[in-house]
Image (cartoon, helix red, strand yellow):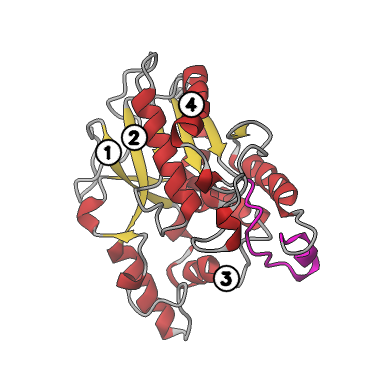
């Protein structure tokens, strides 16, 4: 039996900050990498403006020593080791071309060096260089609101889609946006209410912009065998994800397998069999011409 059935297949993921890749696609990345696919992760910023959830590392915050970006590079490397990903890089090289933009309307958002202020075509040109180098069959990124409206997520979406549009030497055959079905999150919220907890403070699934109508979910990857890798990678992002935070609280309510299934909307290309009972494509590489 071939232990590397996906050898020769290539995927490119475009994310805004370290940790986004693990939360959204950690199980998918680990599964395909273990089966021989070549996975490339491009992270657009180092996440300098993120919150620091470890009290002993509070001095790293941008309002103090401004050392969080460098620390998050180390966290990303540790997380990628857990997922088995060897090719991970920052847009522009060394992660210092674009700075974390912070939330919309904040002072950091107006800095000239932040990702949100970048020229779309210039940034897309940098990503296009990577596309021409690694020649991905599929690309994964965010939807048009970046999942939940963070400017760097929106910008990552714009840059990724523009780079695909500009790519003339290599055709990215399928493009996916990360998503998560409302039915799953709604069930999780109700289960968490039973134990007096909540998921990001939401009373209803409609309070969470990243939860989409189930009809918009075209594809699902069941990588529950790799959920331990994903959870280990989440723990590696120690300044951003805590064991008593909403992600692990949801795991406690629905079981770790909730993070083993990852959901997508196909926006370029055509879905192909195999399909699950809900008619969702179950292999992101299905129908790809491996060349």
**Mark 3, secondary structure of its residue:** loop
Quarter of the image for the C terminus: give it.
Answer: top left
Q: Residues within 10 Å of mark 2 (few under 14, many from 20)?
A: many
**Mark 4, secondary structure of its residue:** helix
Please tell me whether residue 53 is drawn above or below residue 4 in the rendered image.
below
Residue occupying image coordinates x 54% and y 67%:
248
Q: Are marks 4 and 2 in contact (CB under 8 Å)?
A: no
**Mark 1, secondary structure of its residue:** strand
Q: Residues within 10 Å of mark 1 (few under 14, many from 20)?
A: few
Q: Is residue 29 left or right of residue 208?
A: right
Question: What's drawn in magenta, residue-wise?
Answer: 46-62
Per the model, the C-alpha gap separating discs 2 and 1 is 6 Å
Sequence-wise, which precedes: disc 1 or disc 4? 4
Q: Is residue 54 magenta?
A: yes
Sequence-wise, which precedes: disc 3 or disc 2? 2
Most foreground residue, 144 or 72 = 144
Question: Which label belongs to residue 245?
Answer: 3
Question: Which label belongs to residue 267?
Answer: 1
Q: Are marks 3 and 1 in contact (CB under 8 Å)?
A: no
Residue occupying image coordinates x 47% and y 18%:
132
Question: Which label belongs to residue 175?
Answer: 2
């Amino acid at each position: 039996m071939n232990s590397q059935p996906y050898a020769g297949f290539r995927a490119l993921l475009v994310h805004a900050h370290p940790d986004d890749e693990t939360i959204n696609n950690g199980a998918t990345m680990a599964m395909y990498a273990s089966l021989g696919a070549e996975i490339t992760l491009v992270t657009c910023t180092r996440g300098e403006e993120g919150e620091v959830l470890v009290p002993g590392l509070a001095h790293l915050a941008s309002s103090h020593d401004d050392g969080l970006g460098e620390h998050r590079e180390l966290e990303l490397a540790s997380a990628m080791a857990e997922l088995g990903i060897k090719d991970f890089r920052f847009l522009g090289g060394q992660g210092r071309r674009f700075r974390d933009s912070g939330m919309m309307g904040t002072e950091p958002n107006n800095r000239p060096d932040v990702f949100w202020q970048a020229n779309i075509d210039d940034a897309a040109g940098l990503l296009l260089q990577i596309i021409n180098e690694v020649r991905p069959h599929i690309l994964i990124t965010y939807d048009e609101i970046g999942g939940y409206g963070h400017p760097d997520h929106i910008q990552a979406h714009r840059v990724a889609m523009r780079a695909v549009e500009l790519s003339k030497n290599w055709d990215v055959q399928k493009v996916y946006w990360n998503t998560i079905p409302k039915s799953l999150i709604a069930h999780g919220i109700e289960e968490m209410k039973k134990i007096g907890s909540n998921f990001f403070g939401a009373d209803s699934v409609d309070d969470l912009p990243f939860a989409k109508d189930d009809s918009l979910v075209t594809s699902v990857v069941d990588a529950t065998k790799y959920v331990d890798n994903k959870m280990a990678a989440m723990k590696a992002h120690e300044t951003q994800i805590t064991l008593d935070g909403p992600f692990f609280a949801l795991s406690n309510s629905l079981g770790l397998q909730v993070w083993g299934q990852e959901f997508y909307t196909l926006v370029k290309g055509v879905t192909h069999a195999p399909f699950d009972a809900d008619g969702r494509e179950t292999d992101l590489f299905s129908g790809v011409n491996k060349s």
